[in-house]
Image (cartoon, rainbow, N blue to C red):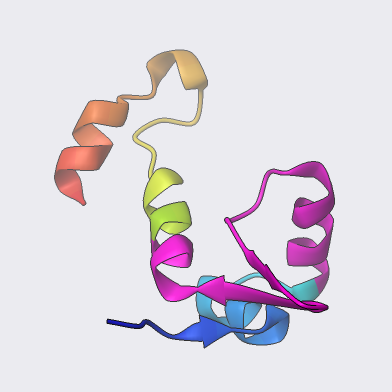
Amino acid sequence: MSTAKFDTAEAANYIGKSASWLNKTRLNGTGPVYLKIGGSVRYDRRDLDAFLAGARRTAVYDHANDNARAARAA
């Protein structure tokens, strides 16, 4: 069972960010999980969805964020 694989531009469009942002987050490890296939970078749709789900918040400040409630709402 295979899922869609996106290049950087397609993945950026899918999550509503720029390709430049994705490139930067690959360097510092804060972006979505990606695949390195030969010289190509690809993003699996499931990894992008997981990244978006992990960004759900209930408050601006970390100390007030209710991750359990955000996960239940997903």
Image location (x, y in percent) of residue 27: 84, 50
Q: Foreground: 69 or 45?
A: 45
Q: Please identify the residue farthest to the left as the structure is shown.
A: 72
Question: Which quarter of the picture shows residue 57?
Answer: top left
Q: Please identify the residue farthest to the front as the structure is shown.
A: 38
The answer to if 42 sits in the magenta stretch is yes
Q: Is residue 40 above or below residue 33?
A: below
Q: Foreground: 73 or 41?
A: 41
The answer to if 55 sits in the magenta stretch is no
Image location (x, y in percent) of residue 9: 70, 84
Which residue is drawn at the image coordinates 49% and 31% (left, top)? Answer: 60
Q: Please identify the residue farthest to the top as the structure is shown.
A: 63
Question: Which quarter of the picture shows residue 1?
Answer: bottom left
Give the extent of the magenta segment.
Answer: 20-49
Q: Relative to 63, is 32 on the left or the right?
A: right
Q: Is residue 28 above or below residue 50?
A: above
Q: Is residue 37 above or below residue 63?
A: below
Which residue is drawn at the image coordinates 31% and 29% (left, top)? Answer: 67
Question: Which quarter of the picture shows residue 3?
Answer: bottom left
